[in-house]
Image (tube, rainbow, N blue to C red):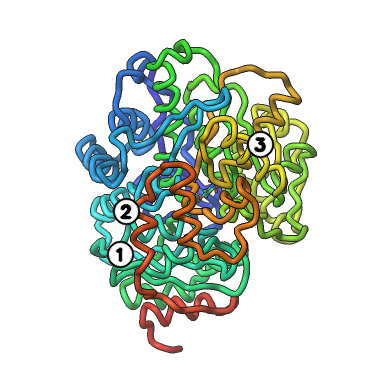
Amino acid sequence: MIMEKLTYESTRGGESGLTASQAVLKGLAEDGGLYMPNRIPGLDISLEQLAKMSYQEAAYEVMKLFLTDYTEEELKSCIASAYDSKFDQPEIVGMRKASGAHYLELFHGSTIAFKDMALSILPYLMTTAAKKNHVENEIVILTATSGDTGKAAMAGFADVPGTRIIVFYPKGGVSRVQELQMVTQKGDNTAVVAIHGNFDDAQTGVKQIFGDQEFGKRLAARKFQLSSANSINIGRLVPQVVYYVYAYAQLVHKGEIKPGEEINVTVPTGNFGNILAAYFAKQMGLPIKTLICASNDNKVLFDFFQTGVYDKRREFVLTTSPSMDILISSNLERLIYLSADSDPQANKRLMEELKAEGRYQVTEKMRQKMSDFWGGYATEQENAAEIKRLFDATGYMIDTHTGVASAVYQKYVAETKDKTPTVIVSTASPYKFSHSVMEAVFGSQGDKEEFQIIDDLCRATGVVVPPAVEEIRNARIRHKRECDVDAMEKSVAEILGLPEI
Ligand SMILES: *Cc1c(COP(=O)(O)O)cnc(C)c1O
């Protein structure tokens, strides 16, 4: 059988035939669409073989299928540089069985949130791509963050030659530890800006800068070109497919499941990148039955899976799971595109409707194609109660995002009686949200200072305070820039020292 060559195309039809490295470099298509492979490749080795592999070996087996213009040597070198002692365990991810479910811990990297899984490798994929494509400009990474991406991206790109990184985060919309991690970031090529708005404002602002062709010319005149480290970059999505394959293989290895047996996955969801990676894994042949999409009070995705109507016109709620405080889940566009049989015009119409009206409705046929997804949500109270229940029952402390997933999983089981073995994706260390988790388990923390609570958390769980938290205890604040939502582009110009116009 001769396979059609794997290339990348925009979900809105404006571009096609890109190589993987070109898609990684550009991040976002010029027509505003996201890059998609023209087909989703199938795994070409058996689950039994995968069960014997290390994380790095499994990563190569998955990523080579998508990143087809990277040589074996290039890709293996990227993988080796990314997944090394930056992670606090050689397995790279943790698996913990508690209260009948398998918690897949994706927070053992340098910034203690799951964004490290992809952002440790993205800088290597991008600089390799720049070399392959003979790029001479300096690459400027623009990133909107709901708290975790910004730090993880800066940790990855700090002092990487040929790159600059500028991060926008919502002032007041992230946890104290998240904010401190960002504003103390070292590296001469890093910049952090707090915007007077929420995450959606930050994300929309960044997309607007990407779409501003005049600004693009001003950048090019100074030998800069933009790229994105947000989860819309295919170089983020592909590395995320790996840990689903690896987790499944590990369950086989440990005898928890038989090769071929179905599992469910429950994913705490914001921008829809993590759960989309699980969907890709399923399309590649990994035996996943149901993808349980867990939301917090910003339950736009829950409503979408219930009704087929995506409606962002609602109040933006600040919750204790800030990395999921999102009303425009960018990566959902890729599922919409696939569900419309990869018809870019159908997708484009819906995305234009979202922009103009703030809502869209998918067809019944498209909904049927999404029937592998089950949407649920947890309120603030339900989340806190679940964190406490699990801790009291097992001594295992989960963070507030994992709490949402765990609470939604309980609802799923109660409603469906489905006993399929389930992986609950654990996306952050509880240390990143110490205040909220301690409050959930032990009640009000009064006006205790953040680091006092962190030390209490250590005493309560016996888990050592991670270096990522220790290092901000006394670090100097290096970034103090703030701006209004409509001045983001101006901030970028100032940071890069572009001449005034
Ligand atoms: C980013 C993030 C999420 C949401 O992931 P998406 O890929 O945006 O859906 C969940 N939990 C944590 C801790 C995160 O940092």
Examine the rendering and report whether any part of residue 483 can be seen.
Answer: yes
Circle 2 residue: 123
Q: Which residue was labeled with disc 3?
A: 407
- Left or right? Give the position of 1 relative to 427: left
In the picture shown, does residue 365 fall above or below 75? above
Proximity of marks 2 and 1: CB atoms separated by less than 8 Å: yes
Three-letter residue code for mark 1: Thr
Q: Name the residue under label 1.
A: 163
| Residue 205, placed above or below residue 391 | below
Mark 1: give few (<14), some (14-19) or many (20+) Cα within 10 Å.
many
Mark 2 surroundings within 10 Å by alpha-carbon count, few (fewer than 14), some (14 through 19), many (20 or more):
many
Type of amino acid at the residue the image marks with label 2: Pro
Cβ–Cβ under 8 Å for marks 3 and 1? no
Kind of element beneath mark 3: helix
Quick one: label 3 or label 2, which is nearer the N terminus? 2
Q: Disc 2 versus disc 1: distance between alpha carbons?
A: 9 Å
Residue at the image position 71 percent from the left and 60 percent from the top: 316
From the viewer's side, name the closer residue of 258 and 340: 258
